[in-house]
Amino acid sequence: MSFLKISHIAIAVEDLETAKKAFETLVGSKVQAVEEVPDQKVKVGMIPIGESRLELAGPTDSASTIAKFIEKHGEGIHHICFEVSDIKAELARLKGAGFQLIDEAPRLGADGHLIAFLHPRTTGGVLVELSEKQD
Ligand code: ZN
């Protein structure tokens, strides 16, 4: 229905180059283009795996949310992203069901998709991202 698939699993890494080599060896395929997201002070490398991807996210600055995450938790899984068919409808449904939204309205994500995050407090400690593809 409207949750279509796991879009990606994001892993917070201290050094993108080091992690890139390790995960390329682990899964046997290459990181696609590395993208820098300046407003989040993060560099992201995506490795496609079937219908999903691994997102390696490394900080470009100590003020980055990824740097703060690593400071607090160490490297590890940062968030899980689900692709949905109608992000606005899902946000309204989830808010109504008592989930705490970080983004009340969708915003533009790294790859031109509309994205929004849910607070880990109401999702078993896991930061959840929703993503809707734009035509
Ligand atoms: Zn993501």
Image (cartoon, helix red, strand yellow):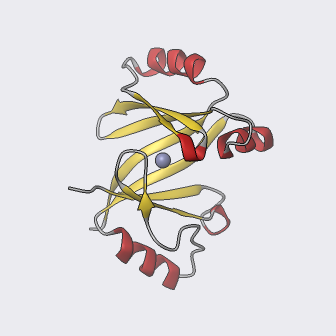
Quadrant into which the N terminus falls:
bottom left
Instruction: Single out the residue that lies furthest toward the bottom.
Output: 96
> 92 above or below 79?
below
> 64 above or below 24?
below
* Residue 42 quadrant: top right
- Please state the total of marks drawn on the protein image: 0
Image coordinates for residue 16, horizontal then vertical, percent: 57, 24
Image coordinates for residue 72, horizontal then vertical, percent: 79, 44
* Residue at the image position 29 percent from the left and 35 percent from the top: 50
Quadrant into which the C terminus falls:
bottom left
Depth check, front residue: 33 or 123: 33
* Residue at the image position 36 percent from the left and 68 percent from the top: 87
Q: Position of 60 compared to 129: left or right?
A: right
> 96 above or below 94?
below
Instruction: Single out the residue that lies furthest toward the left.
Output: 135
> 65 above or below 96?
above
* Residue 106 quadrant: bottom left
* Residue at the image position 73 percent from the left and 42 percent from the top: 63
